[in-house]
Amino acid sequence: METKWIHFENLQEKEEILREAAGIIRQGGLVAFPTETVYGLGANALDEKAAKKIYAAKGRPSDNPLIVHISSVKELDELAVEVSHAGKKLAEAYWPGPLTLVFPKKPQVPDGTTGGLDTVAVRMPSDPLARKLIALAGVPIAAPSANRSGRPSPTTAEHVWQDMQGRIEMLLDGGSVGIGLESTIVDVTGQIPVLLRPGAVTMEMLESVVGHVEIDPAIQGPPKEGIRPKAPGMKYRHYAPRGELTLVEGEPGAVAEEINRLVKERQEEGRRVGVITTEETKNRYTGGIIRSIGERVHEETIAHNLFAVLREFDDLKVDYIYSESFSQENLGQAIMNRLVKAAGYHIIRV
Ligand code: TXA
Ligand code: MG
């Protein structure tokens, strides 16, 4: 299959191309498109065969359910049996935006979309291009992140091209995304909302709207035997860079000293090593390929650059990556969740 990579030149052309893309979706094909979080790989959510194509293109296990994207709140009626009070309040507060809510599903949502679950995860993206595409398609769009399974989520069209070229009909290029980490997922099927994946809508933001929110244990530590994470995707080792990633935690001076020591040790073994640091601390490092991912005082810059830096280290074929770690507050919870998983829970405390 030949993948069409579309750069938008003017608004008139945009409308025409979005119509073509919407047609592909309606006919059961695959279109990658930008959202404010990461690029998504879209298909008609109500067409079981189309959903299956997503799993094939990604190389993703088919028990891992997809997020269904809508362009207006009324489209929720055809997906969810019931919207709880908390679900309503959270949707009102943060839709359109980087928040996915899990509801009991209606029968017309195929098992191929929900991985056989009796719930459906729904999100209304704020990216205008994404919303326009969904509205023109006239059907809800199932879209996981547009990466091959196990690779970091794509935050630019180039990332999608690397992973999906030849596997999908069309790639809509909207430039670099705004946030850079996938949406927050909250299960609102029970009495108390449960956070299943942290994202740019933070715990603090959720609790300011609905009071107490529980945290799924799968977010905090390595998978424990016998405990199933409520978001099936959380059990996979996501975002795994090709190099072995280790986080180093502690006071900045001690962290830099330990990373410098480890880098030297690996280099003496003839290995290629990458270092993930920040604007505030980058001058403390003496060896390896040093990449600053942003400013600690502006944690949204760190969220925005994290996946791109992990991909860059893949391309540079580094054998080991050592990274500073971050506070767990606000957006830090999502940043650390992705980093800790990418590291396979390998953390050194100094
Ligand atoms: O920001 C995002 O959410 C991006 C963009 C494209 O919208 N999408 C995304 O999709 O990150 P994906 O497939 O990479 O991650 C979906 C996550 C998985 O961990 C999956 O297990 C969980 O959502 N999920 C989907 N349906 C669910 C359900 N019914 N109950 C619990 N978790 C669900
Ligand atoms: Mg993903």
Image (cartoon, rainbow, N blue to C red):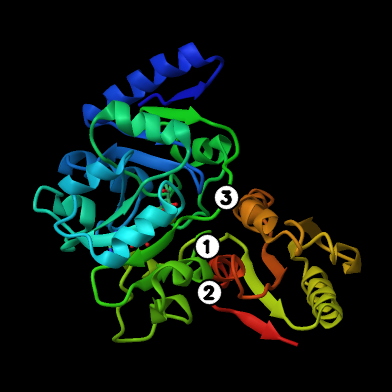
| Residue 291 coordinates in the image, percent (x, y) | 77, 56
Residue type at mark 1: give it.
Ala
Outermost residue, left direction? 107
In the rendered structure, which disc, 3 or 1, sits on the residue that comes first in sequence? 3
Residue 76, above or below 302: above
Q: What's the mark number on residue 240? A: 1
Q: Nearer the viewer, residue 15 or 337?
A: 15
Q: What separation in Å lies between label 3 and label 1 (alpha carbons)? A: 20 Å
Instruction: Tell me whether the residue at label 3 lies in contact with that at label 2, contact meaning CB atoms closer than 8 angstroms.
Output: no
Residue type at mark 2: give it.
Gly
Q: Which residue is mark 3?
A: 179
> Quick one: SS at disc 2?
loop
Position of the N terminus, as image quadrant, is top left
Instruction: Tell me whether the residue at label 1 lies in contact with that at label 2, contact meaning CB atoms closer than 8 angstroms.
Output: yes
Q: What separation in Å lies between label 3 and label 2 (alpha carbons)? A: 23 Å
Q: What's the mark number on residue 344? A: 2
Look at the image and tell me whether residue 64 can be seen. Answer: no
